Amino acid sequence: MTAVEVETIEQAPEPIVPGAPPPQPLWIDFWRGIADDNPVLIQMLGLCPTMAISNQVKNGLGMGAATLFVLVFSSLFISLLRKIIPTEVRLATYILIIATFVTIADLVMQAYSPLLSRTLGPFVPLIVVNCIILGRAEAFAGKVKPSRALMDALGQGLGFTLALTFMCIVREVLGSGTFLGVSVFGPHYEPWVFMIMPPGGFLTMGLMFLAMGWWGERKKAQLNAQLVGVAR
């Protein structure tokens, strides 16, 4: 076999996998999870932990970091092993891989931040069944090469963390008058206590969805106006 033939084989594209996403630049895979396909604001996934622990910023940062860690490493391993995982047991295998990294994240959090671990309670172990992670494994990581799976996981994880942290900031600042435990408005501020209660979570989430809907309609209207201008 000549050197040219070897180089051709090495550069040959991977075979098309049924249901695999179309080829795209890595930066698009990354950016999609942050903005265009945000898991919380667009896909509306992972809402249970988002609603339950978003009354303090430190909770959001801790949950976001744990989810990002699990999402990145599970997606990477699933992509690396995608060719040897039998189709019949792929979901069970995905859950086993995800549970491994969830256990690591949980043990590390218990060791280095026991107070945060107790505050988050069962929501860290429940990352195993988080729709964001299992959904990306089934729809993306199990069908693409590791570089794409890694960038997609980083984008989705950061998108989840940013949305969760923003919600935490709104609820903590208005509901407690603090940011990461530091007073923002001074001693005379009367906190909006309902913002750190479940109704405040529903209100904040609804306003975020409303803002995203408005922004989406605005972008659609601008695109339509540009198409009309080009047609003329």
Image (cartoon, helix red, strand yellow):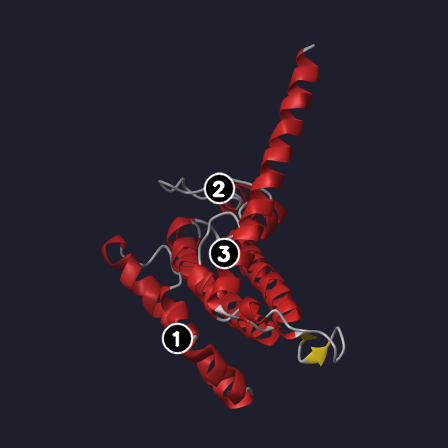
Which residue is at a point 37% across and 41% down the rendered structure image?
A: 19
109 or 141, which lies in front?
109
- The label nearer to you, 2 versus 3, is 3
* Mark 1–mark 3 CB contact (< 8 Å): no
Is any part of residue 65 visible from this angle?
Answer: yes
Q: Which residue is mark 1?
A: 125
Residue holding disc 3:
146
Q: Is residue 71 visible?
A: no
- Label 2 Cα neighbours within 10 Å, binned few <14 / some 14-19 / many ≥20: few
The kind of residue tagged 2 is Pro
What type is the residue that disc 3 sits on? Answer: Pro
Q: CA distance from mark 2 to mark 1?
A: 38 Å
Query: How crowded is the residue under tag 3: few (<14 C-alpha within 10 Å), some, or many (20+)?
Result: some
Residue 177 in the image, given as x and y percentages of width and height: 68, 73
- How far, Cα to Cα, is label 1 from label 3? 25 Å
As drawn, 7 above or below 100 = above
Residue 63 in the image, given as x and y percentages of width and height: 52, 71
Q: What label sits on residue 13 in the rendered view?
A: 2
Q: In the displayed orientation, state which residue is furthest to the top.
A: 232
Task: For marks 1 and 3, give the one nearer the viewer.
Answer: 1
Assign a secondary structure to mark 1: helix
Label 3: state its secondary structure.
helix
